[in-house]
Image: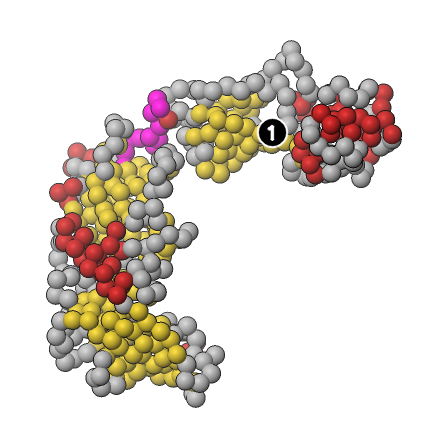
Amino acid sequence: MHRGTNPKMKNKKYFLSLALIIFSGCFFVSSEKVQADVNNFQAYALITPDTTPTIRGSIDAADVGTTTITVQVEGGDVKNVTSIDADGNWSYTYTSAMTEGAYDYEAIATKGVNTLTINWTNGLNIDSGNDYDIYWWGSSSSAVEFIDFPEGYLYSALAEGFEVSFDENSKVTKLGGGTFDVGEWYMEKASDSNDKIINKLRFGVPNITLSFSNPVVISFLVGTSYNGQTLHVFSKSDDGEDDGWEPETTCVVSSGNCTFSVSHASYFAVSEYNSLADDEEKAHIDSWKAYRYEDTNKHCSSRLKLIIKGKHFDEDAEVEIGSHNASSVEKRSSKELVAKFCFPKLLENKSDHKRKIYITNPDADTEEADKEINLDEVSFESGEGGDYYSSGNSEGIRNIQKRLHQLGLLDSRYITGIFGSITVDAVKNFQQKNGLPETGFVGPLTQAKL
């Protein structure tokens, strides 16, 4: 149970202590008989200030009522667990006080003739210097996969302008690899030069992506002057790169606090504005690829897909080629957009009619990307729909011949849809000019180069 407001230094002391304990602890699982019928049995390691601790764990909900569980702490009596809820969460609370220190303990699940035993070395740690009951399950090092918070917890640093609380029965899970060293867990008020930001928080474990089974509630102290106002909350990754601020949620300020829920650790910022883009965060194009593909839509049988890479792409960014708007724009990240167009004549190579790519962020200070790219040639790689340059059908052969003609390697009268000897020679010429095996056959490498 939460025991009052705790300053940041005390939080750091707690997490460092937990990291050391996790590093020194270990467990192993053994089976006395066939264990197939004892499903997903877990017993959690624990650090607690309580001298009458509660041991916790879980089994499959389907095993509730058919499985008995016992626990034994370092030479003490075997205790029968009677508290198991419908979801399979079990617990046993000791009534006799223990002295401070680290204890080994054993938990055994029995179902019929089948048993499963979990032995924890230093799995129970009683330390009055820590303020929380933290349960966790992992390996014999600090690189744990997740930490359970079976009670509600609050981390406060209101002097720095924020507080963070975990809901009851929350689980913090490590995503994407890396070492989950809880001794590095931190929260801090982070400065930002963007004058649109009212308050900013860096919360999590450095370079690790964390998710929460139950929402974590973050409250920014923004001042009573914002009472009743809807503010915008943004987040961005903590991976050493500036991915730009992504819209996260909103909050309505009450008693000077902007309070919101999130399911991941990150940088968080709150602002009056619905975009944090400034002069240095206008849409910027680094590179692009264009693909032509066929569509079954009779009104638009030939389409163009444009993949644009850069940075600071807004959720509602608009993409244009010349004066033509994209029919759809998919934002894969703040660094990549996929735009689709429907106008076949765009693909005609006209040196006297160059086209440019524009990206507009609705709330950016400038109206177009700061880099314009001439689109006087389009990469005719096989995109969506596939087989654009297939030599297995007349349409694909005709596309190959059209491209060879554009490159000056085949006379237009040979655009017939028939893969004859003249086309084979033209393909070999193309392959020779591009450092490819001169086979005369249009395989994947030649298709990609075309």
**Quadrant holding the N terminus:** bottom left
Q: Label 1: few (<14), some or many (≥20) within 10 Å? A: many
Colour scheme in the image? secondary structure
- Is residue 315 at least partly visible in the picture? no
Which residue is depicted at the point 43% across and 79% down?
38
User: Dot 1 corresponds to which residue?
Assistant: 290
Residue 391 is left or right of residue 290, and the answer is: right
Residue 355 is a magenta residue: no
> Going by the image, does 33 lie left or right of 399?
left
What's under tag 1, amino acid-wise? Ala
Q: Secondary structure at mark 1?
A: strand
Q: What residue sits 75% from the left and 19% below the top?
A: 408
Q: Name which residue lies at 16% across and 41% down.
A: 160
Residue 441's quadrant in the figure?
top right
Residue lying furthest top in this view?
A: 352
Q: Which residues are magenta?
A: 270-280
Q: Residue 115 location, x and y as percent? A: 40, 83
Does residue 424 lie above or below 128 as drawn? above
Residue 383, compared with residue 144, is above or below; it is above
